[in-house]
Amino acid sequence: MSDGLLTRNELRSSAWRPLFRDVYADAHLTVTHRHRCTAVARWLVPPGTAVAGRSAAALYGVGRVALDEPIDVLTPKGPFPLPSHPKAAPRSVPGGDHRQEPAGGDRQDPRVGRRQGPMTGLRVHRGEVDPSDVADRVGVLVTTPARTCWDLARWLDAVEAVVVIDGLLARRLTDVSALREYALARAGLRGWRSLLRAVDLADPGAESPQESRTRVRLVLAGLPRPRTQWVVSDGGRFVARLDLAWPEFKVAVEYDGLWHDDPEQFHRDRRRLNRLIGGDWLVLHVTARRLRDDFDGFVAEVREALRSRHHRRQGRTGHDRARTWK
């Protein structure tokens, strides 16, 4: 603007899209999470601040942060500085992002994750930041996978923290032993017990966030920990792979997701389940609606299934008895 390349009215036109206060992108650009993080790292936070939490996990390819959600950042303790800029000057980042810095340093405090136009701002967390806890990923400072898990365990409830940690484990960005070591090395600091608890609940075998949520909530409800992606075979022949299973009881839980709208997939799934029934498996199904509206009822069903199979095993006399439950 100071060079006469753009006017404020032009920035308000349909040719530009606001990302944050005084941060703009070409309206034809398909804005991604990385674009937003790049803009934040370059112009909205002081040096040493790293993209963190769920926002960091998304940069690692785990989960997603919607374009109307705040970006989580971690900044060293102390006042959040608001640098002043004596002249307004358009700035750009790879991909076509532009920032116009207003004259006189009149910039809104970016600490508040409020909406700026159609986008959200920042969610700022303060804490001790060791240099080994951050890494540069294509020009964006981001917390390491281990530090990301630490922060997730502190900032989110146990279920949602484990959902993201499962994803990081599944991508082999870290592992359970490394996370335990990380937590124990920080014993006494705020959050170390939360990370240990989350790691104990985590499982790299989970293949979707909803599977993770189902598993963790069942365990937190007091049920035995299930095995993930359990393979059922018959004489060495593959029969099925189950989302969650208690193989000693031949009880399984399957999460029914949106792919069931595919008739061919539905056909294959039901054929697979019929073969499981022939192998004496009891399979319970859960949907997003039941997870949301009737999880207690679902827990009761799983508990009863496990209880019935446990009693049945205790009642065996050396040969299989006929199934007597419905």
Image (cartoon, rainbow, N blue to C red):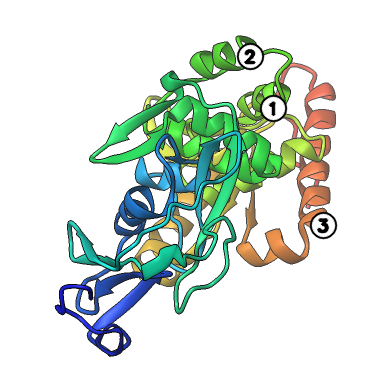
Res. 44 visible in picture: yes
Q: Badge 2: how crowded within 10 Å, few (<14), some, or many (20+)?
A: few
From the viewer's perspective, is residue 289 above or below residue 16? above
Find residue 317 and report its image quarter: top right
Does 251 sit left or right of 117 as displayed? right
Residue 23 vertical position relative to residue 182 in the rendered view, above or below: below
Read off the residue under disc 1. 191
Q: What residue would you read off at disc 2?
A: 186
Q: Are marks 3 and 2 in contact (CB under 8 Å)?
A: no
- Tell me which residue sits at (82%, 57%) in the image: 297
Which mark is on residue 297?
Answer: 3
N-terminal of the pair, mark 2 or mark 1, is 2
> Residue 160: percent from the left, percent from the top?
62, 46
Residue 281 visible, this angle? no
| Left or right of 29 in this view: 184 | right
Discs 3/1, front: 1
- Which residue corresponds to the image point at 68% horizontal and 21% vertical from the top-left? 192
Numbered disc 1: secondary structure = loop
Q: Position of residue 199 (x, y in %)?
A: 61, 25
